[in-house]
Amino acid sequence: MNKTIVVKLGGATLGSHDTAIEDVVELQRQGKLLVIVHGGGKLVTEWLTKRGISSRFVQGERVTDRATLEVVISVLAGLVNKKIVAAINSAGGQAVGISGVDGALIQGEVKNTELGYVGRVVKVDLALLETLLQSGYIPVVAPLGLHSKERPGKAPQILNINADVVAGEIAAAIGAERLIFLTDVVGICNQQDELLPQLSPSEAEALVVAGVASGGMIPKIKACLRALSNTSTACIIDGRQPHSLSKNIEEGNGGTTIQAVD
């Protein structure tokens, strides 16, 4: 399992000219073990808008009431997950779509009342992932979690969990070889909007504290730092660039690399 590469696909990177699926299939053909965690926030927002439900975010995380949660579950575990799985299988790969609820993979509790039914991960059960990987499949994980047994009686059994957080927690639990975020930005930049190709964990954390990294970049950096507790390398790269995933794995370049300090 420590040779596994965890890839977080941002919904914004899966466009008509995207090569991520092509790269995933080729990497699997080469014998690489991959776990994919996907987002889909933009599509969730679109479907919420169709239903007349407004979206609100706090530090890059969606505030999730019961009505929002229903849409989140439907769009992420249904539409987005199955489209990615279908694309991989149609391109010649072998993938199985699951969510963090399946096999109690991701178990969580409510993070704070301000965010509603957004979960903090309390446990990762790798049994299902190990079974799928050993059977030759790429697990494609929708970022939902099973509400832990201590949940209040009337609370929902499923929680919305930030996809970046899920990717970081899975990478840490597996002891992954590498965690890669495919995004729609060039990587982590300084105050002058210049790309920072290499960062230590302390340097990355300082960017968050100083407010240089903001919005959706905050959970990505925090997820990288979480993964680095048991993973040597975490990368945030531009998924819009052709074959950026393959190039990062094969050559180690592109975007920002956060490396654990020996």
Image (tube, rainbow, N blue to C red):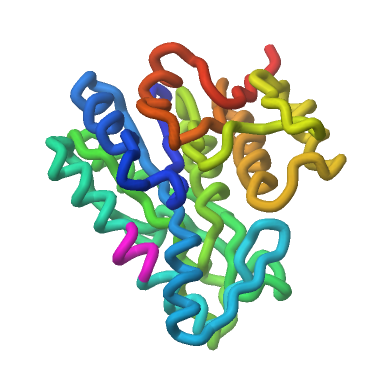
Q: For the point 64% across and 50% down, which residue is it?
A: 216
- Pick whichever, 149 or 228, lies toward us: 228
Instruction: Say left or right for 211 vs 177.
Output: right
Q: Residue 17 magenta-drawn?
A: no
Question: On the rendered structure, is 236 left or right of 208?
Answer: left
Q: Position of residue 94 (x, y in %)?
A: 17, 39
Location of residue 255 with respect to 80 vertically, above or below:
above
Residue 204 on image: x %, y %: 74, 31
User: Can you see residue 28?
Assistant: yes
Tally of marks: 0
The residue located at (43%, 64%) in the rendering is: 43
- The N terminus sits in image quarter: top left
Q: Which residues are magenta?
A: 75-80
Residue visible at 55% across and 28% down? 235
Q: Residue furthest right?
A: 210
Q: Quadrant of residue 206?
A: top right
